[in-house]
Image (spheres, rainbow, N blue to C red):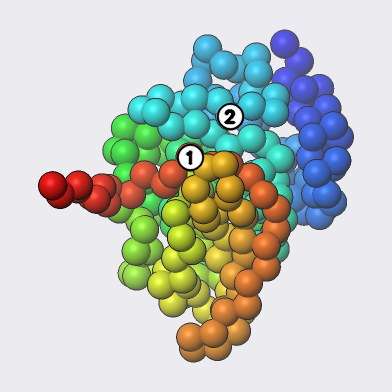
Amino acid sequence: MNFEKARANMVEQQIRTWEVLDQTVLDSIRAIPREKFVPEAYRTIAYSDFEIPIGYGEKMMTPKIEARLAQSINLSSSDRVLEVGTGSGYLTALLAHQCAQVTTIEYRSELLKKAQKILRLQGYNNILFEQGNGIGGWEPNEPYEAIVLTGSVATARLAIGQQLAIGGRLFMVSGEDPVMEAQLFTRVGESEFVSETLFETALAPLVSGEAKPQFKF
């Protein structure tokens, strides 16, 4: 299979048509071999508009969601980013390709090890890997210019936004299936945020290790 051609087709047919026109984002997507982050059984559809399973009940975002996310947080080469939910490592690569440093946290140690191995083989040396529950953020490396939650949450969580620098951006998908919204929060003051609804979508819940509510009788 010609992966380079498939990647080019994905950019033109999926990414651009979903209002992703930022040249830095497009160049990053063209440069990253997405097939390297996909389980071998799914490599022929690495560039399809499909949530690819990566094991342990987890799935990759579709390429257009990843691209819109990257465009919305508007990274610069000096930015520091916190990613909550490493997953396959592909989005980590997309972020790392555009900024100074990514701190990525993954609850499942098995996924973190796989992603770390792939990213190292791809030559990324500006990524810090952490294993654990990232829903509360990661204070040792704050402040960040951008924070990304890669799974959905039932309600918007702005507490993690306190780890942003002023002017920093927080991306999250909140709500419950089938009504979810991708939102961007920009920190404009010590406890002030400006919100923007980007698009409607559906995303699997963020695996954070939080205990589920127990029913009482």
The image shows residue 170, relative to residue 85, as above or below, that is: below
Task: Residue 12 in the image: state x and y as whole percent.
Answer: 86, 34
Task: Residue 61 in the image: state x and y as whole percent.
Answer: 58, 37
Place residue 122 in its image quadrant. top right
* Residue drawn 71% across the image and 40% down it: 64
Q: Nearer the viewer, residue 99 or 124?
A: 99
Place residue 51 in its image quadrant. top right
Amino acid at pointer 2: Glu
Is 165 positioned to the left or the right of 69 in the image? Answer: left
Amino acid at pointer 1: Ala
* Residue drawn 52% across the image and 79% down it: 165
Cβ–Cβ below 8 Å for labels 2 and 1?
yes
Residue 136: tell me if it is visible: yes
The secondary structure type at the circle numbered 1 is loop
Residue 126: tell me if it is visible: no
Tell me the residue that label 1 is attached to: 204
Which circle marks residue 51 in the picture?
2
Which circle marks residue 123 in the picture?
none
Is 172 positioned to the left or the right of 74 in the image? Answer: left
Q: Nearer the viewer, residue 103 or 55?
A: 55
Q: Nearer the viewer, residue 50 or 155?
A: 155
Closest to the camera, between mark 2 and mark 1, is: 1
* Quadrant for the N terminus in the image: top right
Neighbours of disc 2 within 10 Å: few (<14), some (14-19), many (20+): some
The image shows residue 36, relative to residue 134, as above or below, that is: above
The secondary structure type at the circle numbered 2 is loop
